[in-house]
Amino acid sequence: MTIPEEAPVIARLRELGIPFTRHEHPAVTTVADASAHWAGIDATHCKNLYLRNQKGNRHYLVVLTASKKADLKAVAGQIGDGKLSFASPERLMTHLGLTPGSVSPFGLINDREHLVRVVLDRDFERATRLAFHPNINTLTFTVAAPDFTRFLAACGNPVQHVSI
């Protein structure tokens, strides 16, 4: 059964001809919670951080491998912005249509004005499959890395690669 939050993601992936696998699990809000449900999911699991700059006029979706911790000062230096901090749940809802715990690059389908800048960990260049929530934290979708790149290109948001 399709859950309402995943339906737009499924529609967009099908529109782009991107195959995916769907995995159900209990609600998870952190990597620590999710890792208990990753056995059998052959993919690079990701952590997604929704950030803003100090002025609050730029927003970033930072995507890194789940095992890493992001040094926000180092990320800010690489993307050429000042201090970064976590954006509020209200900003997350306004720009990506998501709630905390469900942050995902698939939320970019809701950013019609392409205001959110995507920052990807360079380690993804070695990944073959990537795993993300489809805008709800009770599911995980996996897609081939080249297909994820196509998805991002179709979204139209600026994408930058950094070393995390």
Image (cartoon, grey):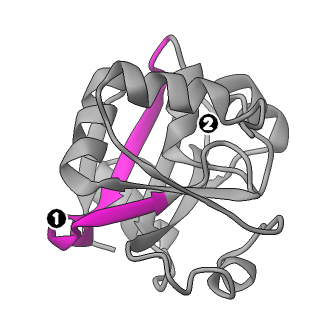
Label 1 sits on what residue type? Glu
Kindly identify the residue that appears in the image at 27 percent across and 55 percent down: 144
Range of magenta residues: 113-131
Few, some or many residues within 10 Å of mark 1 (<14, 14–19, 20+): few
View extreme (top): residue? 113
For the N terminus, the quadrant is: top right
Q: Is residue 33 above or below residue 23?
A: below
Query: Which residue was labeled with disc 1?
Result: 125
Residue 125, percent from left and from top: 16, 64
Q: Where residue 79 is drawn, which disc sits there?
A: none
Q: Secondary structure at mark 1?
A: helix
Q: Is residue 7 above or below residue 49?
A: above
Q: Is residue 80 above or below residue 108?
A: below
Upstream in sequence: badge 2 or badge 1: 2
Kindly identify the residue that appears in the image at 31 percent across and 48 percent down: 80
Mark-to-mark CA distance, 2 and 1: 31 Å
Q: Is residue 116 left or right of residue 17?
A: right
Q: Nearer the viewer, residue 56 or 113?
A: 113
Query: Which residue was labeled with disc 2?
Result: 55
The answer to whether residue 115 is magenta is yes
Q: Is residue 124 left or right of residue 112?
A: left
The answer to whether residue 120 is magenta is yes
